[in-house]
Amino acid sequence: MRGHRAQAHRKWITLATLLIVALVFVPWNHSTGRVTTAAKRAASSPPGEGV
């Protein structure tokens, strides 16, 4: 009878795990735009001038 509680709530445990993974991945994968903005500034500045 080991794991009876886990088997009884298997669906909810799986859904909760997937939700946690999704909530961690979405902000991590979302670009802030800082890299793009810095790259545009560096590309538009005259040679020899740093960002």
Image (spheres, grey):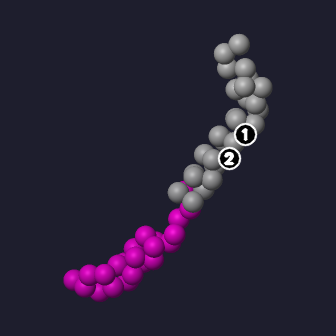
User: Would residue 13 be counted in the magenta stretch?
Assistant: no
Magenta residues span 29-51
Say if residue 40 shows up in the picture: yes
Q: Secondary structure at mark 2?
A: helix
Within 10 Å of disc 2 (Cα), the crowding (few <14, some 14-19, many 20+) is few
Above or below, comparing residue 44 to residue 39 in the picture: below
Quarter in which the C terminus is drawn: bottom left
Pinpoint residue 12: horizontal percent, then vertical percent. 75, 37
Q: Amino acid at mark 1?
A: Leu
Residue for point 45% across, 73% down: 34
Q: CA distance from mark 1 to mark 2?
A: 6 Å
Instruction: Specify the quadrant that holds the N terminus.
Output: top right
**Disc 1 target residue:** 15
At a point 22% along the width and 83% down the height, the residue shown is 48
Q: Is residue 45 magenta?
A: yes
Q: Is residue 36 above or below residue 51?
A: above
